[in-house]
Structure formats: structure tokens, C-alpha cells
Image (cartoon, rainbow, N blue to C red):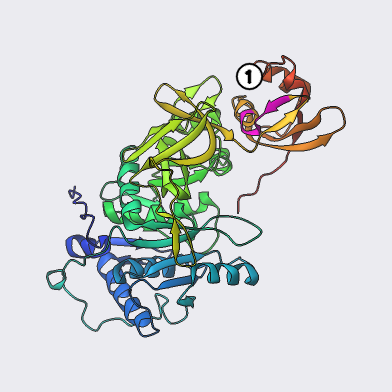
């Protein structure tokens, strides 16, 4: 087995891989593959294309495409050329995109035209590994601006350094090891920090990213390609387990489960197949993961212990505060970065949590509370309690106006067999929701939801 040599912080990780394992597969496509050396050449060519369009050190490149391979090339070209990578969701309405472009002061707005993988020239004689030299990068400079999610208004731009991503990836590998021969499905969009996190984890460890540009069911992808690592949400894991596919036999060894609270039953079913399932807590402002490796409790699954190079503490009110090497540089607007942290370096997340030993359990948003019959209720707390019921595999709680209670929580649930006994389910919630009133669970309306779609 090849021993992994991690690139040093001050050097381009792709060039490091092109030098040390150039003939190994960097990206596995539906048809064919791209080696680290070939990817390195494409990134160099992309650098030349954009320099010819006026990009200079510190310029901001607003990149809009739905093609993940092209986005990987551009992201690495920006790191290598010291440009600021600004990917945006191609589904953004033009007005929203225009407002965001003005907010960040983009030097160039581009799509895949002229720089796509198939549009780059191929060198007549591929360079040998011995001819390559390390490329220095600026680890503390602004590397990217990631737009915070939102359906209305102009999104905020969170500024990260390459150093943020570097330590995020190294800390992730503390509980989610990556070794030579592993493959990770790049299933998350690269305009979100979670997608970029997969790219940097794979580059630093020298393992293969797998790309499917067609939208295929996960079970079909697993049948076509060997995947050792997956990033999923609860519903996707449920569908895989329900399909009858043996995850372990398909090659899956690790699943990083994000996107909210996890069903203990599902986690146990995947673990019974021999797969390690890691729940996680993360955010854009912390360059993806903060915690990992779960612990089962009476009220659900934790998000795990705090990963290396991060720190977490709770205020007296239970608000989660974070700091560390992965904390983003700040919010960027009109050429100015506004730091995220207070004078002591802590960022107030707005999330509510509690400690279970050394594990963090996220209990919802501080500002997501609803008041029902005079009781303060956090929707996420109800979701966690519902998911602790074995036959419930997904739960989403919203608020509705009610003449008696003022507000009532409405839980939409998905069950294993597609049936629901609301009264019996309510009784099973008794004592599972923190409240000074013993009958709080009776205020909850529970409805069966047939299908949760994950786009």
C-alpha cells in the first residue's frame, strides 16, 4: 500500500499529487478517468485562459456552471493563481446573481465556455513528474467567497482562506480516514462548502473523486462504480437501506451523514452491514465539519466529538460558540471583510446545543423557537424525539397558527410501512420533550408525509 505524504500548507496540493502520484486517478468519470498529472495540466491551461481575460492576483472570479469537473478545475486554478474563487448556484435568479456580483465586486463572470475540460488543449507530450516543481500558494490570503444559502435577497459572502480548508480536511480525517485506493462520490454541489471540503480531503489524501454528471439513483451509481466514502442525508440513507442493496458488498466503508438530525434506527442498520456511519455538525463559517463520530443517547444521536483544530463551547443559554483554524475570515462586502468572531475569537452560531460527555448534541436554532400554550418549544427537539421511534425514518416540524395555543408544532413524518397512529405516537413522545408542562406532547399535530424528495 502506498504511504500517503500530505502536502505542506504552503504548496498547491494538486501539484504535490502530480509530482508524487501523477499516474494515479484523481477523478473517476462515468466513462474514463483523469490522472493527477492530466488534471494538473488542465488547471495550468485554465490559468492561462483566465489570465488572458484580465484576471490578476486578488481578482474575484464569479463562476456559474452546473458542471462539477469544470468547477474543480477552476477552483484549483484560482488557488494556484491567487485569484478569489466565487462559485454560485446556477439556479440563482438573474437579479439575485447580479446583486451578489456587485456585493463581491467580481472582476470576471464566467461559465464553462472556453475552459471546460474538453475545451482545454492537450499537450503533445505530457510533462514527466520529474519536470514538475512545487507551486507555492498563499495559505492566509482570501481564497474563496461562498454564498450563504437563501431563497430571497442577496446572499452573504463568507470568505475562507486555503488554510481554513486545509485544516478542515486534516481534522475530518481524524475520524474519517482516507487511504490510497479509496473513492469518494462528489455528490454535493461545489458552490457549497461541503462540496469543496470533499475536493480538498481527496487531494490532501491522494484519493479518487468520483463524478456522475447524470442524475442517477445512488444504488445505480454504486452498482457501476466502487465507492468507499459517501456524503448523505437521512432520507438518502433510508432509500439505500430500503433498496436491499448491501452497502458493504458494494464497497462502501464510511458514510458521512449530515443535513440535520439522524435516525438511530437507520444508523444502526447501516452499521450492522459493516459500514461506519458518522453524523456531523458543520457550517459554512467553519469550512464544513465541526464535529464527527456519533454517540447514541436516549434522545437521539449526537453530532460527535469536536474535531482537531476546532474549539466549541456553550453559553449559559446553551448557544454554541466556535473558533479555531477552520473559522472563516469573515463576511465580504464591497472589498471589506467583517470578522465573524468577537474580541476573544469566538463565533456565535445561533445554534442551541448540549454536551453528552465530550459529544455535542445540537438541539435546534436559538431563534427557531415557537411558543405553544406558553411553553417554549424547539422544533428540532421534537424531530429528534420522533426519530428515536424505530418506525419513523424522517421528521420535519413546522409551526402553525392556532386560536387555542397561539402556535402549534406540526410534525410531518415518514414511516417504514407508510402508516401512522397519531395518538399512539404522541404518547410515546411523553417525557421526551423538555417542558415544564407534562402534556406538551399533546399539542403536537403529527401528519404522515408520503415522500421526502432530496434534490
Work out whether 34 lies above or below 412: below
Please state the horizontal and vertical placement of residue 159, each as a whole percent of the image. 43, 58
Q: Is residue 378 left or right of residue 253?
A: right
Task: Report the residue marked by disc 1.
Answer: 432
Q: What is the magenta range?
A: 375-381
Q: Is residue 249 visible?
A: no
Q: Between residues 438 and 294, which one lies in front from this camera angle?
A: 438
Q: Estimate how packed mark 1 is, as few (under 14), some (14 to 19) or many (20 or more) residues with alpha carbons within 10 Å.
A: some
Please state the horizontal and vertical placement of residue 332, each as a whole percent of the image. 47, 61
Q: Between residues 213 and 343, which one lies in front from this camera angle?
A: 343
Work out whether 188 lies above or below 398: below
Please state the horizontal and vertical placement of residue 329, each as a whole percent of the image. 39, 54
**Residue depicted at x 48% and y 65%:** 87
Q: Quadrant of residue 346?
A: top left
Q: Is residue 277 left or right of residue 429?
A: left
Work out whether 132 lies above or below 140: below
Please state the horizontal and vertical placement of residue 311, each as a whole percent of the image. 37, 36
Total marks placed: 1
136 drawn magenta: no
Q: Is residue 118 visible?
A: yes
Work out whether 386 lies above or below 67: above
Amino acid at each position: 500500500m502506498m504511504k500517503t505524504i500530505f502536502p505542506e500548507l504552503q504548496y498547491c496540493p494538486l501539484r504535490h499529487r502530480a509530482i508524487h502520484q501523477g499516474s494515479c486517478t484523481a477523478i473517476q468519470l462515468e466513462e474514463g478517468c483523469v490522472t493527477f498529472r492530466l488534471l494538473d495540466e488542465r488547471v495550468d491551461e485554465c490559468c492561462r485562459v483566465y489570465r488572458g481575460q484580465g484576471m490578476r492576483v486578488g481578482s474575484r472570479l464569479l463562476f456559474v456552471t452546473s458542471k462539477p469537473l469544470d468547477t474543480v478545475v477552476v477552483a484549483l486554478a484560482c488557488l494556484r493563481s491567487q485569484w478569489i474563487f466565487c462559485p454560485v448556484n446556477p439556479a440563482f435568479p438573474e437579479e439575485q446573481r447580479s446583486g451578489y456580483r456587485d456585493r463581491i465586486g467580481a472582476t470576471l463572470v464566467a461559465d464553462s465556455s472556453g475552459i471546460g475540460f474538453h475545451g482545454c488543449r492537450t499537450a503533445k507530450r505530457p510533462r514527466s513528474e520529474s519536470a514538475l516543481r512545487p507551486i507555492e500558494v498563499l495559505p492566509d490570503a482570501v481564497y474563496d467567497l461562498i454564498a450563504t444559502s437563501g431563497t430571497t435577497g442577496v446572499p452573504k459572502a463568507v470568505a475562507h482562506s486555503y488554510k481554513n480548508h486545509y485544516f478542515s480536511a486534516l481534522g475530518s480525517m481524524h475520524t474519517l480516514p482516507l487511504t490510497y485506493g479509496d473513492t469518494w462520490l462528489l455528490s454535493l454541489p461545489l458552490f457549497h462548502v461541503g462540496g469543496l471540503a470533499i475536493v480538498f480531503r481527496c487531494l490532501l489524501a491522494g484519493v479518487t473523486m468520483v463524478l456522475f454528471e447524470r442524475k442517477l439513483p445512488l444504488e445505480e451509481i454504486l452498482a457501476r462504480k466502487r465507492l468507499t466514502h459517501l456524503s448523505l442525508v437521512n432520507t438518502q440513507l433510508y432509500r439505500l437501506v430500503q433498496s436491499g442493496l448491501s452497502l458493504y458488498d458494494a464497497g462502501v466503508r464510511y458514510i458521512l451523514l449530515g443535513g440535520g438530525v439522524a435516525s438511530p434506527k437507520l444508523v444502526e442498520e447501516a452499521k450492522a452491514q459493516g459500514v461506519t456511519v458518522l453524523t456531523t455538525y458543520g457550517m459554512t463559517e467553519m469550512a464544513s465539519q465541526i464535529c464527527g463520530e456519533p454517540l447514541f443517547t436516549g434522545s437521539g444521536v449526537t453530532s460527535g466529538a469536536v474535531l482537531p483544530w476546532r474549539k466549541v463551547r456553550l453559553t449559559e443559554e446553551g448557544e454554541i460558540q466556535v473558533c479555531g483554524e477552520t473559522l472563516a475570515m469573515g463576511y465580504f462586502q464591497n472589498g471589506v471583510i467583517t470578522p465573524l468572531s468577537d474580541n476573544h475569537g469566538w463565533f456565535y452560531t445561533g445554534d442551541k446545543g448540549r454536551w453528552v460527555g465530550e459529544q455535542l448534541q445540537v438541539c435546534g436554532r436559538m431563534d427557531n423557537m415557537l411558543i405553544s400554550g406558553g411553553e417554549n418549544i424547539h422544533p428540532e427537539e421534537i424531530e429528534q424525539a420522533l426519530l428515536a421511534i424505530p418506525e419513523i425514518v424522517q421528521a420535519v416540524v413546522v409551526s402553525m397558527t392556532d386560536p387555542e395555543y397561539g402556535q402549534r408544532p406540526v410534525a410531518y413524518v415518514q414511516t417504514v410501512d407508510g402508516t401512522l397512529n397519531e395518538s399512539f405516537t404522541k404518547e410515546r413522545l411523553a417525557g421526551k420533550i423538555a417542558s415544564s408542562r407534562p402534556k406538551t406532547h399533546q399539542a403536537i399535530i403529527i401528519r404522515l408525509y408520503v415522500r421526502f424528495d432530496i434534490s
